[in-house]
Image: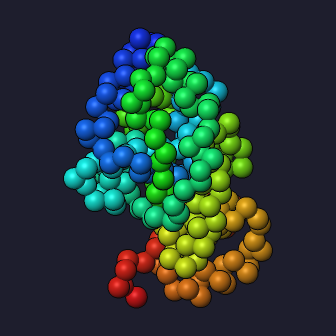
Amino acid sequence: MGYLKDISDKELRKGIVEFMESAPDLYLPGVSIDSTIFGFHNNQLKVLLLRFGTSEYFVLPGGFIKKEEDLDDAALRILRERTGLLDIYLEQFYTSGNLQRYKESIPKELVLKIIGKIPKSSWFEQRFISVCYYALVDDTKVNPQPEPFFSEFKWYDVTKLPKLLYDHKLIIKKALDRLQTDLDAKLVGFNLMSETFTMAELQRLYEAVNQRKFVRTNFQRKILSLNILERLEKQYSGKAHKAPYLYRFKKMGVS
């Protein structure tokens, strides 16, 4: 599933130049935010990526912190701008200060190709340290907003990523590692599920996140022992096979 923008080279160039001119007055220098946005669809754990210009390279959705803005508020604002969603589960998990990411030449070459000349005072000439968050969303409700640098928003299976700029492949791996931990420690899985679901559907989420299979009886025993699910009435379809129970996550503070 992808979201293409009908944008001309002229519009792309204009958007990049305007951003580079205004950024020093609007944003904190040297600090950026990168967000790994996870969605779960058709039994696949996916991540939302942005195509850099019209190149073959993609990046994580990200942005910068306004001079009069809290860090977490900036992360939420950037996610709203990138997804069109208001209610988003967000978790900070990593800070990337890798010197090599600053030295990568491909982004500068791509910008140079689009706008023809990079000013000496270019916003992107400085070194950036990136604060990294992961977010959990319903990917069917995402409505990406226009961006000056990007021509396409696209969901990718976490096991089949395209070419990525900077250290974004490493950031996605670290986000997935953290999500695997939080799935049990913080029980964040409900942010990726429909309101009601079968035990088999929940197991497929856990398998997609952990990238391994679980024995059905063992998985069900473990999940039920956590006392986090409310079992609902069976939904009969009229077919001969036995209908599974539906579940939903219990509300916090409700036993």
Classify residue 47 as left or right of residue 30. Answer: right
Where's the N terminus, which quadrant?
Answer: top right
Classify residue 246 as left or right of residue 104. Answer: left
The correct choice, above or below, for 73 with respect to 224 in the image is: above
The spot of residue 208 in percent (x, y) is 67, 59
- How many marks on residues? 0
Q: Residue at x 58, y 60 (%)?
A: 175
Where's the C terminus, which quadrant?
Answer: bottom left
Q: Residue at x 34, y 42 (%)?
A: 81
The spot of residue 3 in percent (x, y) is 49, 30
Residue extending farthest to the left is 68
Res. 86 visible in picture: yes
For the residue pair 82 and 25, the one nearer the viewer reads as 25
Quarter residue 240 falls in: bottom right
The correct choice, above or below, for 201 with respect to 56 in the image is: below
Q: Residue at x 36, y 17 (%)?
A: 14
The correct choice, above or below, for 211 with respect to 215 in the image is: above
Classify residue 171 as left or right of residue 7. Answer: right
The spot of residue 70 in percent (x, y) is 28, 59
The correct choice, above or below, for 103 with respect to 129 in the image is: above
The spot of residue 182 in percent (x, y) is 55, 72
Q: Residue at x 65, y 57 (%)?
A: 173
Quarter residue 107 falls in: top right
Residue extending farthest to the front is 120
For the residue pair 233 and 145, the one nearer the viewer reads as 145
